[in-house]
Amino acid sequence: MYTLAHRLDSAESFGLVVSAMRRSTPNSEAVAEAQRAFIGTIAALDEVALGSMIAALEPFANEARRHRLRSVIDARLDSVTVLFDSPYDPHNGAAVLRSCDAFGVQRLHVVERKQTFLAAREVARGSQRWVDVHAYPSGPPATARLAASGFELVATHPEGDLVPEELARIPRVALVLGNERDGIADDLAGACARRVRVPMRGFAESLNVSVTAAILLRAATEGRPGDLSVMERSRLYLRALALTLPRAPEILAAHGLILEEAG
């Protein structure tokens, strides 16, 4: 039997709602922790297991839904990502997460430092189900992982040498966003090869971090074809079917494929 270590009996987001929030934000979610068991279990499935689960669920999705899921997944990007340094405000965290989803960016990396990454669910609007969030306690593990994957780290800065349109020409780019109050910490800034600015003509010298993220992601993803591997697309397709089909655990159980509550 294949086991998914998470209960998926509704299309609601992953669990772990946190009640006491920074800025008194209600209904926020510790996204990386909430995703870990479910996404990790799907990642461990081999090709045969994936195929069996997809074959069990797919007949319960109509043609329009299957086409929609496949078209979105086929456009998903591995070559653009975001590294967010110790976000403080759950609204900003959720807005950046939502922008990643909107522009097809599959992974968001977060350096948590002293506080857990939280996303306000009413702002995220379900995007926390689709974007993989990877959390790190400090900068070096995050930059090492991205460097090993061939990413060029580009910091956001008002005096950057790059303009947004140039991001699309970087083969693998990781946009580094700073903390709302303190900017980008030294351990991340030192790992950035270049800096990018958002040209402005007003009296304001900077934009909200989530607005900056949306502008830069729009530019960085322009013209890029989807580039997830075949296995990654299959995993994401299974995830989408499991999260959007009513009674997915029961359907799988009828085929001898068990969904059980994470321990």
Image (cartoon, helix red, strand yellow):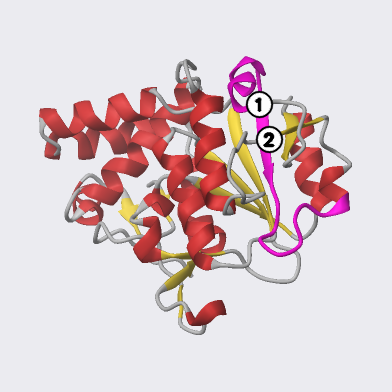
Residue occupied by mark 2 = 197
Q: Is residue 168 magenta?
A: yes
Task: Find numbered disc 2 in the image and state the secondary structure of the residue it sits on.
Answer: loop
Res 198 quadrant in image: top right
Q: Is residue 111 left or right of residue 37?
A: right
User: In the rendering, at what x and y percent does residue 111 appear?
Assistant: 71, 56
Labels 2 & 1 near each other (Cβ < 8 A): yes
- How many C-alpha atoms fall within 10 Å of the one at disc 1: few (<14), some, or many (≥20)? some
Q: What residue appears at the point 33 percent right and 56 percent down from the top-left corner?
A: 125
Q: What residue appears at the point 31 percent right and 38 percent down from the top-left corner?
A: 53
The part of the chain drawn in magenta is 163-186
User: In the rendering, at what x and y percent does residue 36 appear?
Assistant: 54, 56
Q: What residue appears at the point 72 percent right and 28 percent down from the top-left corner?
A: 151
Q: Is residue 229 left or right of residue 111?
A: left
> Which numbered disc, 2 or 1, marks the residue that appears first in the sequence?
1
Q: CA distance from mark 2 to mark 1?
A: 6 Å
Amino acid carrying mark 1 in the image: Val
Residue 182 in sight in this render: yes
Vertical placement of 13 versus 18: above or below?
above
Task: Find numbered disc 1 in the image and state the secondary structure of the residue it sits on.
Answer: loop
- How many C-alpha atoms fall within 10 Å of the one at disc 2: few (<14), some, or many (≥20)? some
User: In the rendering, at what x and y percent does residue 105 appear?
Assistant: 50, 35
Q: Is residue 65 left or right of residue 151?
A: left
Q: Which mark is residue 163?
A: 1
Residue 228 in sight in this render: no
Q: Is residue 141 magenta?
A: no
Vertical placement of 198 versus 23: above or below?
above
User: In the rendering, at what x and y percent does residue 215 appear?
Assistant: 52, 37
Amino acid carrying mark 2 in the image: Arg
